[in-house]
Image: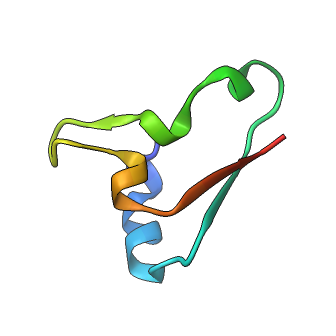
Amino acid sequence: MIRPIESQIATSSPKNIAIIATEQLRYIPFETLYDEKNDQVLLEKYPIYSVS
């Protein structure tokens, strides 16, 4: 889900990433999405918080 925009995220070196999920997407724990390539969850790579 994040891979298509990950290069843009990495380039901008964000202080925080806000995920504003609606409807059924709000049930996805974005912080724990696993990156097999780097053996990390998303929260280990970027500062993330969810807004509902």
Which residue is at a point 37% across and 66% down the rendered structure image? 7
Location of residue 25 in the rendering, given as x and y in whole percent from the top left corner? 70, 26
Residue 22 spot, x, y in % from top left: 82, 32
Lateral position of residue 28 relative to residue 47, left or right? right
The residue lying toward the viewer, choosing from 42 and 2, is 42
As displayed, is residue 22 above or below residue 4? above
Q: Is 11 drawn above or below residue 47 in the view shown?
A: below
Q: How is the image coloured?
A: rainbow
**Quick check: 27 left or right of 14?**
right
Q: Nearer the viewer, residue 12 or 42?
A: 42
Work out whether 36 lies above or below 3.
above
- Res 21 quadrant in image: top right
Q: How many marks?
A: 0
Residue 50 lies left or right of residue 14; in this view the side is right
Q: In which quadrant of the rendered view does residue 36 lie? A: top left
As drawn, is 30 to the left or to the right of 40? Answer: right
- Residue shown at 43%/51% (left/top)? 43
| Quadrant in the picture for the C terminus | top right
Residue 1 seen from this side:
no
Where residue 10 sits in the image (x, y, percent)? 38, 72
**Residue 9 location in percent, x, y?**
46, 68
Question: Which residue is pictured at 48% across the width and 81% down the height?
Answer: 12
Q: Is residue 24 visible?
A: yes
